[in-house]
Amino acid sequence: MNKFLMSGNFIIGEAAIRAGCRFYAGYPITPQNELTEYMAEHMRRAEGGVFLQSESEVAAINMIAGASAAGARVMTSSSSPGISLKQEGISSMAACELPGVIVNIMRGGPGLGNIRPSQGDYFQATRGGGHGDYRTMVFAPATCQELADLTMDAFDYADKYRTPVMILADGMMGQMMEPVIFKKPKPRQYPEKFMLRGAGDGKSKFIRGLLLDPIDSEEHNWKLARKYEVIVENETRHEEHLCDDADLAIVAYGTAARIAKGAIKRLQDSGMKVGLFRPITLWPFPEMKLRALSEKVKRFLVFEMSTGQMLDDVRLALQGYAQIDFHGRPGGAVPTPAELANVVARVYSKKAQTVY
Amino acid sequence: MVKIVSQRPKSLKDKIFHYCPGCGHSIVHRIMCEVIDEMDIRGITIGVPPAGCAVLAYNYFDVDMIEAPHGRGPAMASGIKRALPDRIVFSYQGDGDLAAIGIAESFHAANRGENITVIFINNAVYGMTGGQMAPTTMLNQRTTTSPDGRKQSLDGYPVKVSEIFSQLPGTTYIERCMVNSPAGVNKTKKAIRKAFQCQRDGLGFSLVEILSPCPTNWKMNTIDSCKWIDDVMSNVFPPGVFKDDIKARATEAAV
Ligand SMILES: Cc1ncc(C[n+]2csc(CCOP(=O)(O)OP(=O)(O)O)c2C)c(N)n1
Ligand code: SF4
């Protein structure tokens, strides 16, 4: 298989097109512009491919919702403030059970924040983000190879569960270059009965999110909830790195996990047994896997490029079974592996325990 | 022999409208379905109803439909049409939907010259939410959020969508009609047919603005509502064809 050396944003675009994405709409925002530009250049060359530069993120999400209903494989991408604008549309896609992939290349926030890498959108991504009782699957790649693989997988999951799926990365992942191999995409399996293509001679169909009758609406909510339960049951993914004999495990995802690996190398070199637990799906969070690890490892340090959001999920998973510490750098500040190693070393050797 | 002079259009489901008596929505639904039947396009038509009184339009139109979030119909319709260029795609919108919250989506779909049709119900108020001021509310018109009448110094002026959109080079056909009289209804039907035909011929963006009674929120009876359209509304929103580039586009397309 051919290896390609490409930057993260380009990889997502290429992986999407290879996965059969034929409709992309987006609005410029740093640090994900290269992805929109890649789609502009390559999507229209793919057979039946549509690229639309929308007038806003609000329009983009509704454009992909329309194209998704019409049966196309669809994607939009943006960065934090733009993702906020898409939330009504994401909620609507979840309600209408429309598949689609949404890429968030996170930047510093809140507000306009800055264009530096950050992980401040964890809550927004994993708690549904928009209004109402729904969840979106969230993948957090940490290497360029994973950007390629998970982008392709995201389309399959979106179809399988008829739901919007999010790729949550940050400016660092978007800009980084690493060699990748694009795997062979699976053929699409999405029944025509879910598509709106005109009734022909048959019965007409409709897709709606408004359910005025509270009992109908409750039933629909429970139906979605049952689907989310299946996802939680079957689709968590994570990586454990050097956890087998670890005294302490860092819990980190995406770019933070890469920094953690650098820190762990330093710590291991100075004789400290530190491992990494890396959630790859943020929703569903690999809760049971983390709890299982707490039978072996009793100290955890959550490291995020935020003031502590995944920390909540780690607390829920560990529920007092282990000691949890936290280190965070919000607002676009990116710590070095050396900085993190120092923090971990202090916690590692500390007697006093902070149990969250 | 019995001669049928009038019957329910095939594309109109056999359901009782939930609209208030005298409401323009039901009239427009019916004539749209007549056009869909006459053009024999039921099987290839996909409609996008709005958040607004017409949110349940899928209960009446027997064509494929997907409801859009408030104001986003033209973005959704653009997505559908680009994915399925040979279908007839329309967005059905109220004045709050089109000219307030969704003005960006409408304006830019028009400006891109999307080959879709927008049916625009101008009833000078937000109907569904209980008669608040819309971008199209007349000066001095009382609504629940302009209790002393709309004041230009506070609320600005009624937005003239047809006039404004006809300035956009991307648009092909724009007409404003009224459904407050049999003649007006016939004229509106012709305009809708022309708009759909424009789309079918691949000639670009068409919009039919329809001055439409909302007796409930105007707090008038049906007859006075129809009169009010003649006496007041149509002075601010004069009916007429604001843009008709159909011939020019057809010639362009032929060349
Ligand atoms: C984001 C959002 N904001 C507000 C609403 C509430 N809402 C529903 S319909 C509507 C206005 C409808 O008025 P109009 O578009 O003029 O249509 P009409 O009901 O008069 O036909 C509003 C404000 C909503 N559904 N979504
Ligand atoms: S409130 Fe107005 S627009 Fe809505 S159904 Fe009643 S008359 Fe029609």
Image: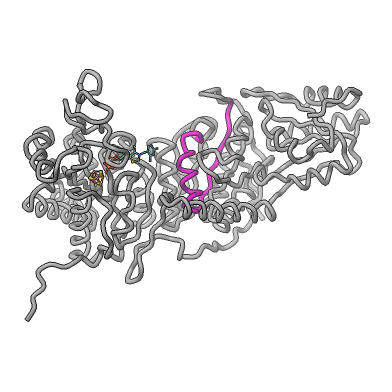
Q: Nearer the viewer, residue B212 or B110?
A: B212
State the quadrant of the N terminus of chain A: bottom right
Q: Is residue B188 magenta?
A: no
Pick out the residue farthest to the top: B153
What kind of colouring is applied to the model shown? Answer: one colour
Give the residue drawn at x 42%, y 38%: A58
In this rendering, position of residue A263 left or right of residue A183: right
x, y percentage for residue A83?
A: 51, 36
> In the image, which residues are magenta?
A83-108
In this rendering, position of residue B175 left or right of residue A49: left
In this rendering, position of residue A304 left or right of residue B118: right
Q: Nearer the viewer, residue B91 or B212?
A: B212
Where residue B65 sits, quadrant-wise, is bottom left
Give the residue drawn at x 72%, y 24%: A335
x, y percentage for residue B102?
A: 33, 37
Give the residue drawn at x 11%, y 73%: B4
x, y percentage for residue A46?
A: 46, 54
Q: Is residue A98 magenta?
A: yes
* Vertical comparison of B61 with A101: above or below: below
